[in-house]
Image: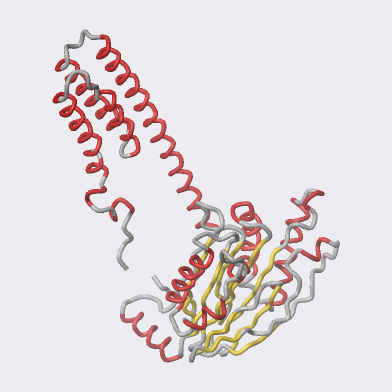
Amino acid sequence: MSPRLGIADARPPWQSPHALLLLPVAFIVVITVVDVQTPTTVHLGPALVIAPAITPSLAGPRATAAVGALALAAQILIGVTHGGLSTMNHIVQIITLAVLSVILVVYSALREHRQAQLAQVRTVAEAAQHVLMWPLPEQIGPLWIASLYLAAEDEAQIGGDLYAATRYEDGVRVLIGDVRGKGLSAIGEAALLLGAFRESAHRRIPLVELATALEQSVIRHAEDLDTPEEAGERFATALLVEIPDRDPVTRMTSCGHPPPLLLSPGNVVTVPSLHPSPPLGVHGVHGVHGGAEHTLDVFSFEPGDTLLLYTDGVVEARDAQGAFYPLIERVTRWSEDSPEALMHHLRRDLLAHVGGRLDDDAALIALHRTPVHRRRHHGLDALRHGSSATDPR
């Protein structure tokens, strides 16, 4: 895979910072030539301040100072040409241009410092978000995986939606969930649920007991942190999925979460009928610490099928007329695409539906079960290249 191009690398040559600096320089040259050629009754010199004024948006304080000095030299040249520097008009223009240039240099320095701070904060935030929401591998066992996360808040990569996947004996366990709230304010609750899942998912306990363990974690968290005003406000929906490597089935336990979609060859999309329990943490509101009774649902998941997990931020996304996003209808078009292509189509189509911005966080995971012969072929190729068949890197 080729490395990504940065923004600066993707710009056309004429949009590079050095090329853009020619604009204020050219402006100074044109103003100076025209002013020198015009009668003394026409004064274009004051317009020279435009050049250092636009430079901070193109470059830093040093370039701004250089352009300001060049504009000041041009103003002095105009003064010498039009009657000398002893006239009050030219003296005032030179002093005014010098003062404004100094102010613009100070402004450019403060702006550059602020941009550096924002860049550092953004880098730290991205690193923290990366630690919290581990990227899913491209392959775990017999599953090819692709995921998509769209945060509602600007500059955020994650929010109240969450997902994780891990190996479990001879299978894979996947969590997708949605805590109350959205954006950065919900990250704490999402971190709690992800940590509880990663701690318990590998243990040899049934899926319903795993759901109970997650609920107890949410309840303990609510008891420790809730204020009287927030009582009953901390809860999360979750869907736990367990996919054995050898058996062509999938086991699910839903805690108030939307059911997944099963995409089969031939553009067939079905919705498994789940028996969901209430969201995690709801029972703790009423002092019931034992949690809800969770149900295990088992469905066929054959090689060649794709299981699409999603949060309600996808199906509740509205267009300008208030219509919800028709996920099943749209997915039918791409049911035979690879997980990566499916995520690409859904991202583009979902953002087009809402006009480019979501009102709630949205997350999707596509799990494609590969045929047996394909898995063996992949493993053979990996051995030939000296790598593990389950390591996408």
- 310 over 57 or under it: above or below: below
- 63 over 125 or under it: above or below: above
Q: Can the viewer see residue 36?
A: yes
Q: Nearer the viewer, residue 300 or 75?
A: 75
Residue positioned most to the right:
287
- 21 over 185 or under it: above or below: above
Q: Is the image coloured rainbow, by chain, by secondary structure, or in one colour?
A: secondary structure
Q: Is residue 145 left or right of residue 178?
A: left
Q: Nearer the viewer, residue 65 or 273?
A: 65
Q: Please identify the quarter of the rendering in which residue 74 is found.
A: top left
Image position, residue 132 (x, y; %):
55, 58
Image position, residue 393 (x, y; %):
39, 70
Q: Nearer the viewer, residue 232 or 335?
A: 335
Image position, residue 207 (x, y; %):
68, 77
Residue lying at 46% horizontally and 89% vertically, measured from the top left: 371
Q: Is residue 244 left or right of residue 124?
A: right
The N terminus lies in quadrant: bottom left
Residue lying at 73% horizontally and 58% vertically, measured from the top left: 234
Q: Can the viewer see residue 176?
A: no
- 179 over 260 or under it: above or below: above
All told, the count of numbered labels is: 0
Image position, residue 299 (x, y; %):
63, 88
Q: Please identify the quarter of the rendering in which residue 204 is found.
A: bottom right
Q: Nearer the viewer, residue 278 or 50?
A: 50
